[in-house]
Amino acid sequence: MARASPRKRQPVNYNEDHKDDDLDRKPSKANGLAVKAETKPIIEKTTAVLKRKAEPETKPREAPAASKKRKTKTSADDSMPLAERTAVSALKKAMYIGAHVSAAGGVQNSVTNAVHIGANSFALFLKSQRKWDNPPIAPEARDLFISGCKDHDYSAAEHALPHGSYLVNLAQPDPTKAAQAYNAFVDDLNRCETLGIKLYNFHPGSAGSDTKAAAIGRIAAQLNKSHKATKTVITVLENMAGSGNVIGSTWEDLRDIIELVEDKERVGVCIDTCHAFAAGYDLRTPETFKATMDSFNEIVGANYLRAFHLNDSKAPFASNRDLHANIGTGFLGLRAFHSVMNEDAFRGMPMVLETPIDKKGADGKTVEDKQVWADEIKLLEGLIGMDPESEEFKKLEKELYARGADERAKIQAQVDKKNSKPAKKKK
């Protein structure tokens, strides 16, 4: 498959996504959600997603009578589900769609936060992303996470997908820093096993000034060491958008790491749709989607695919820019996600949204609007079995794409300006 040649660039700022999702933050009031996964129609009308107003609600939702009243900035939003969970058995294909939810205040809160948006899978951080050393998971938090998954019918082993720390670089060549990275990494793996989680997603890392081959060797060595120190968790490599010193932006990078891993049952891959598109793997049409997945299966192997991060892209094809957009509003477009949602080979995998949910509140301050994720989950579920040639799909595709026009034009102008500059000559 033809693929754009990578351009040299600075390392991706891995802290861009979820930079405010930190376990150190104080939790909002525990809400005691008790919503079960009950059978419900997939979506009353997919186009209704578009009619939701972007402005904040003028009338807050009323909290359940049983909950204690305590005023917080998020109490009105967090007191009741934004959407009911769709029973996966009611879908035409068993797609487990969710989002990277907050675990602020304790890992157990990720479960209720997932229920809150109607998610059937979820990602979380297992500890603070702002520091290397973290206290162990409290027994109470552990027990509440396990019981919460059981009560709400989540399989932690199959559909929880923790995200690794952005501080960790397993390709680190400095011995002291490499030991620090490894200790933080294996600590997360132990946390997964404590919680009954089997999949652990992480960014491969950066080679820095060293060769890519040497960096890949160090990543695999750290994985081999971590597998011997733990029992069951599968380390899931995420593909990256960058080029140059960033490892994982090509299927070959992922293949080369896996080849050096001794226990092949303990390693897998999570495909991020935005990262793949930015790295030069096209998903926009049924034909290019098939070509991209065929190349993955041939180079890496279909048996290693374990999960998806579902993100549209604010940046154009092969730009090497990691800029997530809401579903259908970016350069990828809705047709790409229709292809993902209707691929039989992807059944049963956690599919996690990392799309933007920040917006300006009435007071001008930035707030999180989790309704965005609730709507996008229903939007993606509605694509399962939908005829892409139908008027319903075409109208939805057109309206979503129009919504992102200004942002696409802005980023396209930046890319064009950068590409118009003559390349600097090496001294």
Image: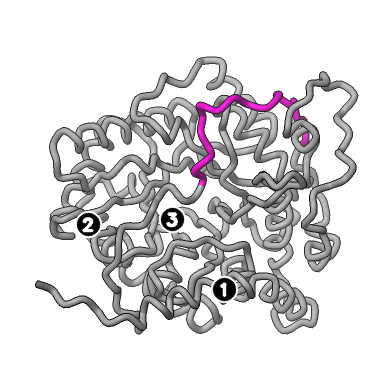
Q: Earlier in the sequence, mark 2 or mark 3?
A: 2
Q: Nearer the viewer, residue 44 or 368?
A: 368
Q: Nearer the viewer, residue 278 or 95?
A: 278
Rendered residue at 55%/51% (across/down): 350
Q: Residues within 10 Å of mark 2 (few under 14, many from 20)?
A: few
Where residue 417 appears, x then y in whole percent?
41, 78
Reading the image, the residue beneath label 2 is 259
Q: Amino acid at mark 1?
A: Arg
Q: Amino acid at mark 3?
A: Cys
Where residue 161 appears, x then y in whole percent?
50, 43
* Left or right: residue 62 compared with residue 271: right
Q: Answer above or below: position of 63 versus 370.
A: above
- Tell me how many marks there are: 3
Reading the image, the residue beneath label 3 is 270
Instruction: Spot the residue most to the top.
Output: 139
CA separation, marks 1 and 3?
26 Å
* Left or right: residue 138 compared with residue 172: right
Q: Residues within 10 Å of mark 1 (few under 14, many from 20)?
A: many
Q: Which residues are magenta?
A: 18-35
Q: Answer above or below: position of 211 versus 165.
A: below
Reading the image, the residue beneath label 1 is 408
